[in-house]
Image (tube, coloured by chain):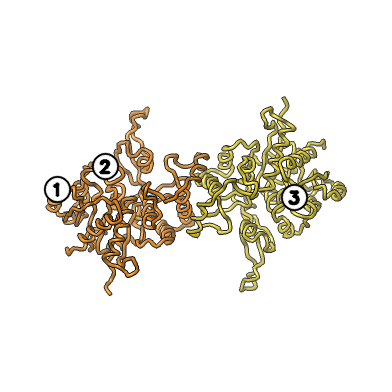
Chain colours: A yellow, B orange
Amino acid sequence: MSAPVRIAVLAGGVGGARFLRGLREAAARRWPDGDGGTTAAITAIVNTGDDAWLAGLRITPDLDSILYTLAGVNDEQRGWGRVGETERVSAELAEYGIGWPWFTLGDLDLGTHIARTSMLRDGLPLSAASARIHSRWPLGVTLLPMTDDEVETHVEVDDPESPDPDQRIRTMHFQEWWTRYRASLPARRFVQQGIETATPAPGVLETIEAADVILLAPSNPVVSIGTILNVPGIRAALSRGAGRVIGVSPIIDGSVVRGMADACLTAIGVATSASAVALHYGARIAGGLLDGWLVDSADNQAVESLAAAGIATVARPLWMVDLEKSAAIADAALELGLRAR
Amino acid sequence: MSAPVRIAVLAGGVGGARFLRGLREAAARRWPDGDGGTTAAITAIVNTGDDAWLAGLRITPDLDSILYTLAGVNDEQRGWGRVGETERVSAELAEYGIGWPWFTLGDLDLGTHIARTSMLRDGLPLSAASARIHSRWPLGVTLLPMTDDEVETHVEVDDPESPDPDQRIRTMHFQEWWTRYRASLPARRFVQQGIETATPAPGVLETIEAADVILLAPSNPVVSIGTILNVPGIRAALSRGAGRVIGVSPIIDGSVVRGMADACLTAIGVATSASAVALHYGARIAGGLLDGWLVDSADNQAVESLAAAGIATVARPLWMVDLEKSAAIADAALELGLRAR
């Protein structure tokens, strides 16, 4: 019996969740374990830069989006949170003036937040608390937070309403910018507070270094994948690892697949195109990250120029509209990643 | 216009809540403000010895029982918690193995706990956090925690199952003894952890000293009223104050009005009778607390002997079966307290 294939994935929230669900399915078909699962070992390294303290509770939106999706308890219609959710506690919190009125915490979701926070307050690191929470469901994927340290993405925006012309920069938590303002306030820059001193969570570097293939999910290249890559040590582990690094474009035909990644790309001076994001990550042979890149069939024209830049690129349908399509995308990424170098 | 009558009440949970609701009504009749309320200033000093950290949240059962009852949102049928309560979050916590399985936290109730804990984590003392929470409803009564410090009543019980004969004492939080074991394990003693270094919350001593009358609600004499009295400074303030101190018996005809106070009295060697509890508090003229004492009509035989011991005692129906009865009891206590000394 050969050793299981080891797959590492860098992932953000909802896009990462759908991709991982497809990957789990693709792996179960390629390497079936005879029991509906896979012999492949899939480990996701998840962005925690969107995390926040809210109403005294530690919220980890990306970990939870992936958890709920892989557990099959996510709300497919709404696109986030738990299915069958209610908001009785949130209504009470609003009466007491606690929390963010524009960020509703569902009752079932609050169960997760309270459990996590209780463990954190007891001294468990986030990775251990998450592992305990994840053990509730058979996920088929190991989820690791990128770091146990508190890293929070904040956004600097122009504040034209400030009375003091020298004070026209306002800083807010990423969640406020993203959820409250729907990324409509032009971002000057993103500040990942605490990232300089953050260390990768236990297992993160080992997972990357031991992986046969490393996939970048079609998540936000700036505030999801970009934040993970900024944790000291992670980028170097990707360069050092023997596994091929394959990314999946979150941009299709010049538009974002979901969310408002274009606003984030604009802030860092990267065009909203599949090509520009690939070149932002960079070709591994030129000191960047990517061995390969998946673009949508609509971006077929990018294949040749990216290949010329040293990034093996293939075009496939990239809309993750259902499990079958997501599995096909993940399978194409695996195909590219496992191709002999 | 004369200064408002100032009434201070020492109170525990459900018994204290019903008594305070009756007192608010009695005061509105004696000293109406023309708007359905009262010109009297009623301040309750509430036991916090039943408080606990549970699932990372600070639970204050007595403060909340009184809050919900005075706000009119309590569950009269069940006798505790919020009316219309659900337990969706609790079911999630159980799945994660967080919390006490024998202590269910309702969803609406959790809103209060999360709000309170959030404020405490932000550095607010309990008295300030409570005041913010209480401001949601017009209560007509000011509720002060006895202390801002964490005092928790623990119970020492025999543990006959211990393999080591020298280790047959087990200590548990009062809530576990009371709620999980329904006080069925004989208590060796009660330990109020943290009480030696606790200080009365802001306003507590001032309230007692300035009061025209001080009432001891028919709450548990050991773990509710007894705990309040053990906060350093409170007993002395009662002795020092000009206001008469009137207690209402929580024992009727040798039985507890509600709860399992008999198990607590037994542990401290006090008989379960209206007389014994009065003598446990002691006559103020003999260095104890009480100027006056209300017993149930069924305990009429105790009136003379207690009077002889220096405690002015009257017998009245003491079952707080409805608002009218509770108001009559409170009014009798006021009558006794405001009688010229």
Residue at 34% in and 39% down: B182
Q: CA distance from mark 3 to mark 1?
A: 85 Å
Indicate the chain on which mark 1 is placed: B
> What residue did someone put label 3 on?
A250
Quarter of the picture containing the C terminus of chain B is bottom left
Amino acid beneath label 3: Pro
> What residue did someone put label 2 on?
B262
Residue B125: image location, x then y, percent: 42, 57
Do marks 2 and 1 share a subunit? yes
Residue at 46% in and 42% down: B99
Q: Earlier in the sequence, mark 2 or mark 1?
A: 2
Mark 3 crowd level (few <14, some 14–19, many ≥20, 10 Å Cα): many
* Residue nearer the viewer, A288 or A47: A47
Mark 1 crowd level (few <14, some 14–19, many ≥20, 10 Å Cα): few
For the residues carrying marks 3 and 1, which lies nearer the camera in this image? Answer: 1
Indicate the chain on which mark 3 is placed: A
Residue A191: image location, x then y, percent: 65, 57
Do marks 3 and 1 share a subunit? no
Say what secondary structure mark 2 lies in. Answer: helix
Do marks 3 and 2 share a subunit? no
Say whether residue A85 is left or right of residue B276: right
Residue A241 can be seen in this image: no
Q: Residue farthest to the top?
A: A1
Residue A205: image location, x then y, percent: 67, 41
Residue A326 is labelled as none
Indicate the chain on which mark 2 is placed: B
Say what secondary structure mark 1 lies in. Answer: loop
Say whether residue B322 is left or right of residue A169: left
- Residue A212 lies in quadrant: top right
Say whether residue A97 is left or right of residue B336: right
> What residue did someone put label 1 on?
B301
Residue B62 can be seen in this image: yes
